[in-house]
Amino acid sequence: MLVNTIIWTGKSVRIIDQTRLPGELVYLDCRDLDTLWQAIRELKVRGAPALGIAAAYGVLLGIKDFKGSDSAAFVRRVGEVCDYIGRSRPTAVNLFASLRQMRLLAENNRTRPVSLLRSVLQAEAKAIFEEDRAVCRAMGQYGAELVPSGGTLMTVCNAGALATADYGTALGVMYAARKAGRKFRVYALETRPLLQGARLTAWELMKNRIDVTLICDNMAASVMRDKSVDVIFAGADRIAANGDTANKIGTYMLAVLAAHHRIPFYIVAPRTTFDLNIADGTQIIVEERSAEEVTSFGARKTAPAGVKVYNPAFDVTPHALISGIVTEYGIIRRPDARNIRRLLKGTQGQGR
Ligand code: MRU
């Protein structure tokens, strides 16, 4: 069962409101840019590839009500919309890659009539969506070979259908392996503080009849040791030129533990998640979120009022701890600047 995480209806961006899962599967029609911006901010739509698609569709929302035939003014509007969407969340590079693509396209066609500019941008947003579908399938194919039959896997956050236009990155590998006839079980970390692992991954894998067991984040080490975890798959929000990878907070911890237990640790991410403009992970901006996400559990306060809180949404895993990065072009083993360049040379991605 695959879900339609995000679609363009022609008038609105329809998303699954992921803050309502697993309780209810509810769609939200974002009919204006502010509603979509807020939905991104509040993680109603989330996950790097889905954010890339949301950004492209957000541009369509932002130009929907543009009146008149002044192409230069229209292109300026596209620029303003892109700047605005770019202030929603800072870490997932897919969002910025899509915005850059949409902005460039508008600028390169600035002398064309507004009606043509509109249709060109619409086609581009659709292409970004379609490309993600194909890319998920390709990553799944490459990654499936890493799943041992009868094996035990581990994952963090949600890098599945809810984070993409198709069946996901890290979870896509699992869906592809299952389709290839492999049987395996998965330990999913709950992923504090917003519980994407518990609310989304557990829900998604159960819906797809994959054997999933939910654990708290602080159980990862003992589960690795006591349950013979064979391989770990995680997604990514931004990968630097040397392979350092930003993903949901807790991913670095998993990679460190995997090294200690000699468990292969793979990142699964499309070309659009690579940011070859930055040399290493120190240059990745990590989003910090509000203290309330840590001091409350639903409506209930779980920490004393006024306590100091540090709440980074992501962490950066050094490339030396990553066994390989599964992309739509193949697996980059021992990812470093040289091996990444070798596989991705000539391919399109951030900055295209
Ligand atoms: O804060 P989120 O839920 O947007 O974080 C998502 C992740 O960290 C995912 O692992 C990543 O975006 C890859 S999704 C295919």
Image (tube, rainbow, N blue to C red):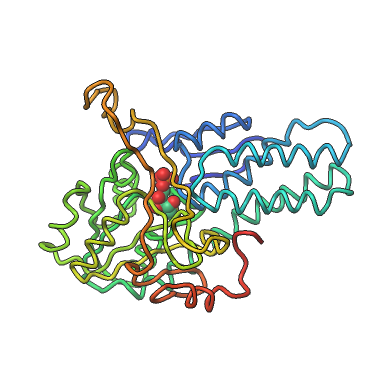
Q: Quadrant of residue 9?
A: top right
Vertical arrangement, residue 95 with respect to residue 65, above or below: below
Q: Position of residue 293 (x, y in %)?
A: 33, 32
Q: Residue at x 29, y 27 (%)?
A: 298
Q: Residue at x 13, y 62 (%)?
A: 227
Vertical arrangement, residue 257 with respect to residue 192, above or below: below
Q: Residue at x 58, y 61 (%)?
A: 277
Q: Is there any visible trace of residue 1 in the rendered image?
A: no
Q: Position of residue 176 (x, y in %)?
A: 39, 67
Q: Is there any visible trace of residue 232 in the rendered image?
A: yes
Vertical arrangement, residue 125 with respect to residue 185, above or below: above
Q: Position of residue 273 (x, y in %)?
A: 51, 59
Q: Position of residue 7 (x, y in %)?
A: 57, 44
For this view, does 17 lie left or right of residue 200?
Answer: right
For the C terminus, the image quarter is bottom right
For this view, does 324 lie left or right of residue 229?
Answer: right
Q: Quadrant of residue 268?
A: bottom left
